[in-house]
Image (spheres, grey):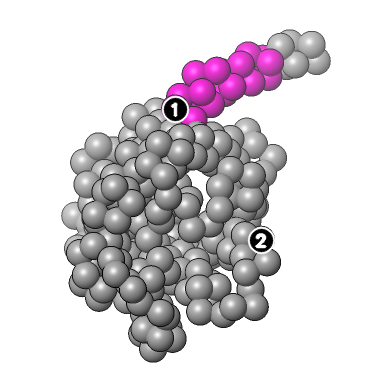
């Protein structure tokens, strides 16, 4: 009979992997927000940092939990790759709690500097270090598009026949960097419901519940968009690209 430690290990791995992802990514976002000299390089350094954060998170958790660290990936794996449905809720909770804890550590490091930001009416500007925001419909299209690209890339990179599988954590991180640079600004892109929800809950506790009403209740966009876009990307890979690749592999084998 498996021990409690072994049963809990994948959930701890998802928690810690997502914590590291959020800690590094939000840390750079907080630096950009509090340092006036980084405005011209914000998109590049944030995109690179989030990509490296994903690499770090996956390297930490992949051998134990599969390195999802993203509800959009977990849900897509459950629908298309046979990931056990009984683990989905636990993974989602672990990922969200990990992101919340990462936000807490970032606040412990940058809270004083964030608190010095000029504050007018409405949401405290420091909350922008933790949440994504933007125009609702533009943001929804961006989240769906970016998540479609990213999850499709995740499925392609981690396919057993992929030449990139041996460097999957790095390749997935680079895929996110490319997606972030090409589709949206870092402050407006989540591609990961846990990355937004966990820190948003923390920001609500630290700066007020305006973070949920901000941007015409924008909070639902980084929840729904990545799940929908990720599932679409997984579908395209599993039912169009992957099966086609398998067919061509059979053809090549027959030719030899």
Nearer to us in this view, 82 or 32: 32
* Count of numbered marks: 2
Q: Residue at x 59, y 22 (%)?
A: 241
Is residue 103 visible to us here? no
Q: Is residue 189 left or right of residue 131?
A: right
Q: Which residue is mark 1?
A: 232
* Image depth: mark 1 or mark 2 in front: 2
Image position of 133 with respect to 158: above or below: below
Residue located at (44% from left, 60% from top):
61
* Residue 46: in magenta span: no
On-image quarter of the C terminus = top right
**In the figure, 19 relative to 47: above or below?**
below
* Magenta stretch, residue numbers: 232-250
At 62% from the left and 60% from the top, the residue drawn is 43
Q: Which residue is mark 2?
A: 44
| Mark-to-mark CA distance, 1 and 2 | 27 Å
Q: Which SS class for mark 2?
A: helix
Q: Position of residue 205 (x, y in %)?
A: 21, 72
Direction right: furthest residue: 256
Residue sitting nearer the eye, 53 or 159: 53
Q: Residue at x 51, y 35 (%)?
A: 145
Residue 225: x and y, percent? 38, 38
Quarter of image, res 207: bottom left
Q: Is residue 233 magenta?
A: yes
Give the camera-side residue of 208 and 220: 208
């Amino acid at each position: 009979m498996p021990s409690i430690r072994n049963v809990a290990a994948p959930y701890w791995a998802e928690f810690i992997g997502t914590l590291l992802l959020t800690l590094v990514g939000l840390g750079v976002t907080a630096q950009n927000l509090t340092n006036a000299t980084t405005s011209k390089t914000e998109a590049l350094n944030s995109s690179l940092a989030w990509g490296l954060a994903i690499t770090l998170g996956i390297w930490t958790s992949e051998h134990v939990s599969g390195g999802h660290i993203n509800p959009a990936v977990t849900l897509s794996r459950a629908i298309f790759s046979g990931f056990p449905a009984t683990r989905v809720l636990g993974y989602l909770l672990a990922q969200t709690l990990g992101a919340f804890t990462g936000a807490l550590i970032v606040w412990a490091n940058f809270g004083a500097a964030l608190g010095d930001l000029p504050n007018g009416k409405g949401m405290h500007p420091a909350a922008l270090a933790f949440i994504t925001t933007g125009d609702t419909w533009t943001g929804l299209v961006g989240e769906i598009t970016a998540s479609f690209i990213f999850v499709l890339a995740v499925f392609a990179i981690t396919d057993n026949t992929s030449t990139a599988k041996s460097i999957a954590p790095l390749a997935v991180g680079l895929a996110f960097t490319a997606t972030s640079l090409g589709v949206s600004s870092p402050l407006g892109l989540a591609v990961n419901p846990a990355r937004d929800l966990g820190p948003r809950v923390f920001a609500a506790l630290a700066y007020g519940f305006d973070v949920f009403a901000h941007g015409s209740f924008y909070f639902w966009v980084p929840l729904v968009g990545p799940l929908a876009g990720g599932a679409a990307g997984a579908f395209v890979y599993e039912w169009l690209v992957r099966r086609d690749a398998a067919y061509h592999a059979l053809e090549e084998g027959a030719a030899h």
